Amino acid sequence: MKKGYLKFALLFGLAVASIYLGYSILHKMAIKKAVAARVAQLPAFQFTNLSGGVFTPQQLAQKPTWLLYFDSTCEFCQMEITDLDRHKEKLTAVQLVLISAEETAVLQKFVRQHSFAQLSNVAIVQDHNHQCPKLLGMNTTPSSLLYDASGRLVERFGGVVKVEKIISLLNEN
């Protein structure tokens, strides 16, 4: 009699675990699909610039745009930033938006340390409301979203990407 209950409990547990696992997989797929649809066109976002003002897509120039989610203490982000510093003259035709969840003082120090950060086509903004992961699907640093001049998604990357590749992709579109 106890063997029957044990078999039933085991089968019931496996069934519940399978249902939960299946639901989790489907839920994650649905979230990825929703994010992909949301970022296919440059979405409405609202970040804070280093002066405390609001930064929205309406402030972007009508040229290819590179959204780069980063953290100044991240080793991989530092590699990408070093590459940006090296190739800053090639980025003049690109609107670069560096997005970070770090504090204002940390980002102001970052601006002082990197000459490209003071270029007119570069904006450094704060993501206080964690829109990068939620709205844009940028869950790791560094993460990049590339848009053409009309706001259509060209490519998305999670991880370090060479600046030459970014420029090549944006110039093709």
Image: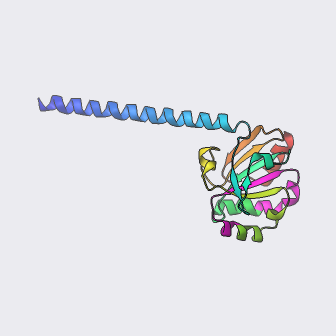
- The furthest residue to the front: 53
Assign the N terminus to one quadrant of the image.
top left
Q: Is residue 87 magenta?
A: yes
Residue 63 location (% of width, % of height): 85, 45
Residue 119 falls in image quadrant? bottom right
Residue 76 location (% of width, % of height): 66, 60
Q: Residue at x 77, y 57 (%)?
A: 123
The magenta span reads: 83-107
Residue 146 falls in image quadrant? top right
Q: Is residue 6 magenta?
A: no
Q: Residue at x 71, y 36 (%)?
A: 40
Q: Residue at x 70, y 61 (%)?
A: 52
Of residues 56 and 34, the one nearer the viewer is 56
Residue 26 horizontal side relative to residue 168, left or right: left
Residue 69 location (% of width, % of height): 67, 54
Of residues 45 and 170, the one nearer the viewer is 45
